[in-house]
Amino acid sequence: MSRGQDGERGIVLVWMAIMLVVLLAMAGFAVDLGSWYLRSSKLQRAADAAALAGVVWMPEDPVSAQAAAMAALQKNGIDTAKVTVTYPPPTSAQQFRVQLSDPAVPTFFSRPFLSTVHETRSATGEYITPVPMGSPRNTFGSGNLLPSPNTENFWAAVSGWCSGRENGDLRQPAYDQTFVSGAWTCGSTLPANGDYDSTGYVYAIDFASTPGQNIAIDVYDPAYNATGSNADNSLKSGSTITTTYTVYGHTASPFDSPTSTTPLYSRTFASGTTGQNSWVNLYTLSAPTAGRYYLQVQTAANEANSYGSNGFALRAHPATAVWNNSTSVCTTIPGDPTYSSSCPQIHGVDDMSIFANQTGSSASFYLAQVDPVYAGKTMKVDLFDPGEGASKLEILDPNGNPVNFDWTTPCGTVNGVTIAAPSGASCNGSTHTAGANNVAYLDVSGTGTQPYSNLSSTSKYSDRTISAFIKLPSDYTGAYGTKTWWRIRYTTTTGTVTDRTTWSVSILGNPVHLVTEK
């Protein structure tokens, strides 16, 4: 063997040794890469869980949001003493962002080349909260008590156990189809109201900032009276309705029921003249902090002869100040002459039961506050028993312009009950179809087919829920700027509307979810 061949053989051995080191390093990196990926996946899952756990507290209580996030991290096996947890600001107040940074993810086979790896993962949760309804002000349902431009044109209202759902209250009457043989009846053999809710209706009182003073919560005409009250309606002489008002503070979690905590105060008003057509102080909050308080209004269950509706109004104001209809009204709408950063906004939660009482050819009512965070989503507006006394209903965007919408109403066989189709329509499955798409307004004029027997009213949509669907602009701010309040406009040919109805507004989609981070 020549010397040259020996040299070449030596070079091959050197190259083999070098390549073996490279191959071992690559194998080490490959094995460690799997370990890093597992660690990354664990961090991401924990961040996701923490973001979802914390977001239900936003925007009211970021301290509790962070505490819930930390608890979720620990349940998911994250040692928060070794992992840095931060909360970068999200893009909206209804989001909550969690970021995890592990600066010392260990290496094994690749340790000679890399001692540790730094991994960072984050997640953003979003909570589609119930949208505020009915009022941006410190008043709700005050009818015609306030001078223009603060006149609300509707009363808050709650009906009695025997009043029959067809009279416009979706949640409190126990029965439906209660007009039997030309007379109102109330008995357990009647069809039950499937939408009955013993908790009644809940209103929120929001404080965007700390007022630093005691706040009085007042109720106008709190007791039902068959005669003499501006906003009460009676179906039958001798009717009585017992109404209870209960004030609640903060819940254990905003995701919990508003009535899940011990009430701060409760007062029951029997039928009579107590506070008739006047304001009564219900309760005074002692220097409330920023956040949300609740007021529940309900009528007594199983109350005989409770054929009617109790109309009332709500307001909140500094307890030391005498209310003035012109100067005490405030609003949460920036730029409005009555805007105040400490205005205690009163609004409906989930749904609102009202008595629309309008004179004149048209009037509009605040419907819901829809913020830019909902851009591109679909808004659903449910109108129960709408439009009596009106000719058409329009939904107005924050600029005050009518929007087109699709709508449906249940008909056919729904949950074992046969519901006749509305006049001029047919049923498709469990909803009606004819003329339901891309309409500029809902024609509520004239009479219509009753959905079933034993109803008094022949109004076109009596005892029906109309569900309207509006696609919100993807560039919400570009379309509406800082405006966020939607309205409903009634138009009438008779000059008077007396519509007892229940409204609700929701944004379609999973209320608590993760959003894609940008």
Image (tube, grey):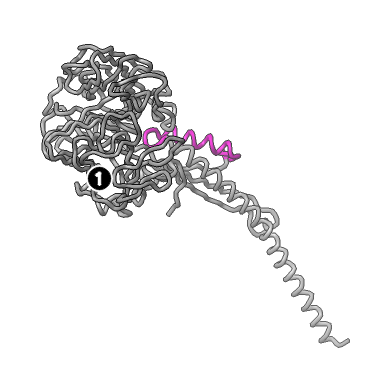
Quadrant that contains the N terminus: bottom right
Q: Which amino acid does the dot numbered 1 rest on?
A: Leu
- Quadrant in the picture for residue 268: top left
Element on which disc 1 rests:
strand
Q: Position of residue 480 (x, y in %)?
A: 24, 50
- Quadrant in the picture for residue 267: top left
Residue 241, placed above or below residue 328:
above
Picture residue at 26% right of the left edge, 44% below the top: 484
Could one spot residue 480 in this view of the protein?
Answer: no
Q: Position of residue 13 (x, y in %)?
A: 79, 75
Could one spot residue 337 in this view of the protein?
Answer: yes
User: Within 10 angstroms of label 1, few (less than 14), some, or many (20 or more) residues?
Assistant: many
Q: Position of residue 163 (x, y in %)?
A: 30, 22
Quadrant that contains the C terminus: bottom left
Residue numbers of the magenta segment: 57-81
Residue 228 located left or right of residue 68: left
Q: Residue furthest right?
A: 1
Q: Does residue 72 show up magenta in the picture?
A: yes
Q: Position of residue 183 (x, y in %)?
A: 28, 21
Give 33 or 136, whichever is nearer the viewer.
136
Picture residue at 30% right of the left edge, 17% below the top: 306
Residue 495 located left or right of residue 71: left
Q: Which residue is mark 1?
A: 442
Residue 419 located left or right of residue 74: left
Q: Does residue 271 show up magenta in the picture?
A: no
Q: How many marks?
A: 1
